[in-house]
Image (cartoon, helix red, strand yellow):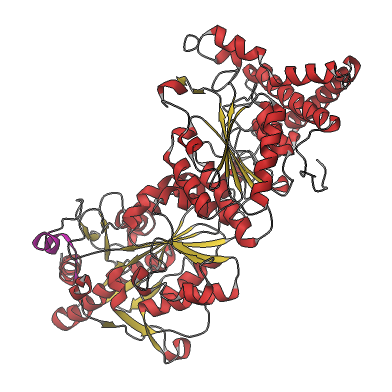
Amino acid sequence: MSQQKKNLSHLGINRELQKKMFYSMLRIRRVQERIDQEYLNDQMKTPVHLCVGQEAIAVGACEAIEQTDYISSNHRGHGHYLAKGGNLKKLIAELHCKSTGCSGGFGGSMHIIDTSVGHLGSSSIVGGGIPLGTGMALASKMKNNGRVSVVFFGDGAADEGVLYESINFAILRKLPVIFILENNKWAVCSPVTTRQTSKNIFHRTDQDLLLTADINGNDIAQVYKTMVQAVNRARSGEGPSFIECDTYRILGHAGCETQDPKGYRELNEINEWKEKCPIKSLKQELMNNGFLENNEIEHLESMIKDEIDDAFAYAVNSPLPSAEDLHGSLFSE
Amino acid sequence: MPWSRIKTDYIEPDFYGKEITGQRRLTYSESLNEALSQALEIDSSVFVMGQGVDDPSGMFGSTKNLQEKYGAKRVFDTPLAETALTGIAAGAAMAGMKPVYFHNRPDFLYLALDQLANHAAKWSYMFAGKVSVPLVIWACIGRGWGSGAQHSQALQGLFMHIPGLKLVMPSTCYDTKGLMLTAIKDPNPVIIIDHRMNYRNQGYVPEKMYTIPFGKGVKRRNGSDVTVVAISHMVTDSLLAAEELYQEEKIDVEIIDPRTLCPLDEELILASVLKTGRLVIVDMGWKTGGVSAEIASLVVEKGFSSLKAPIKRVTCPDLPTPSGYTLEDVFYIDKNQIKKAVVEAVLG
């Protein structure tokens, strides 16, 4: 990721940015697919929660912010981690419970971190990361360092009262925080329709207090453009934003595709959303406009495959933590 | 609310000697207030938050005038939302700030448990030490005057159980300042559980900043017959009991004040029991699975051969706190129960 300050003064997305975002989404997708394929080999002894179908949200949001900005992520967090610039080798090593993993083998798939890119660790308590990300924004405001904080959470977390409490405080203090609700329709096997009766109540908020948007989360241009507005608002001290992204969890709640229990949702529903794949649609757009050729895609695919092969090799060849490591860093020095 | 009439003002003995403490005597709240003021003064990352911290009578006077001195950006009232506010404080700590979050009562910390136990306490371990959470949570046990089941709980046993939290329970004016300054300096989540009866204390407190190491208890009274390990305000009641026992029964009580429950000064407790052979533990928390159970287990595990008699525990009964004063009188422990337990431990 470029260290240079991104120019967000216009809402337009140029060809380079589109291609960069395409690559970034494709990379996340291929990483998730490889994890899915290898999961039954039982080398990754950690419950994985894959984000296939939701890549546009992570990438569109992270492309609109800087490396020094914060994100707060959750159990379904590989996409956020990679989109923010998190180290792939250390992610795969963490899934293999290795000492070289991003969390030293103490975290597993649900607890990943890369402080060098503003990712201070993901929570697997649904909604737990919402106040943490809000607190990072409070720190930014108090230090006046211009950093924004982006909080990713799902519709399950929108069931939790802590969201209301956090947004209230963010409005009260005009914090530079952007709440991104990834409405993927499912919390484990519970549909959102049995848990919430209507659109989220924050959409009714006064826009001066809280900028809100209800967008197609599988359209990366929409995600990016909305984020640009929210980031500009946050950096200029105007306060928080709430962006609901309509999307879908293509795979099961946890584990690999074949472990998804059958019968709780219709196959048609999954297939319809597969058609709305954010990567497929951007690829089509780029190809239609002559910005992307088949041979270029092949080249990208091969680069990504090599990188993933390397990451898995690194993980497999890395040492495991041993008994002496157990006490670890219960307390910081 | 005349809760404070339950006890009279208490002049602390000169525990540390004037060469350490100087000649200045402060009230308990003045001492804690000075610690906060000095921390805010020297470190711009320190801030004080909590419902009522800008109230002149807020936190029993501990946070008085801090907002006037350091501004509303660094000393601020909060919504009551304990869950989110704890997470917000923890998130700010992860991003380099040092929040001190005040609660009038430990009872409200139940609302904060997800962020305390699932997040703040786990972050360092779960991420192999890559992020630290320098967060101080302060809450004050509100014994007395009908405070009842939801405004008087002593929850130290609960917090002592959770790995990743440091737990501090001061008992003197000198300690409340030094321990608060250590807590603010510590890069980990620290819970300070105070007791509002401590607020009747006056004692010698140096003006300069000083810290008190965690995990170092103190001997409050030297004795030879029996060890009393007393927690927080129970130190004061134990001292009164010890003086009377010496006068009335010629029983010579040694009093140990651990000051911090995590880390716990095991050596000091074990050395004292080795000397006296008898142990009474005094804690105003519940008996089952609590602080007294843990300290008793420690001594049974590591100092069994020192014991000449069964360990006695003086705690509140395993019940919610009743509100009515006749019931409060029998629910709470005081000097008399301590004396009775000590006599039983010594005479059998």
| Residue located 84% across and 24% down the image | A306
Whole-percent x, y for residue A233 in the image: 65, 48
Residue span colored magenta: B324-334
Image-based side of B90 in relation to A325, left or right:
left
Would residue B122 be visible to someone looking at this image?
no
Whole-percent x, y for residue B19 in the image: 47, 91
Q: Is residue B14 above or below residue A64?
A: below
Residue B104 versus residue B313: which sits nearer the camera? B104
> Which residue in the rendered view is the most extreme toward the top?
A268
Residue B26 versus residue B239: which sits nearer the camera? B26
Q: Residue B340, located in which quarter of the rendered image?
A: bottom left
Q: Is residue A329 above or below residue A312?
A: below
Whole-percent x, y for residue B40 in the image: 54, 72
| Residue located 71% across and 28% down the image | A220
Image-based side of B165 in relation to B257, left or right:
right
Q: Is residue A60 above or below residue B52?
A: above
How many numbered marks are there? 0
Q: Is residue A289 above or below residue B74?
A: above
Residue B135 versus residue A187: which sits nearer the camera? A187
Q: Main secondary structure of the magenta part?
A: helix
Residue B332: in magenta span: yes
Would residue A315 be visible to someone looking at this image?
yes
Image-based side of A136 in relation to B282, left or right:
right
Quadrant, the N terminus of chain B? bottom left
Residue A52 versus residue B74: which sits nearer the camera? B74
Quadrant, the C terminus of chain B? bottom left
> Which residue in the rendered view is the most extreme toward the bottom?
B23
Residue B9: in magenta span: no
Whole-percent x, y for residue A165 in the image: 45, 46
Q: Residue B146, located in which quarter of the rendered image?
A: bottom left
> Which residue in the rendered view is the most extreme toward the left?
B326
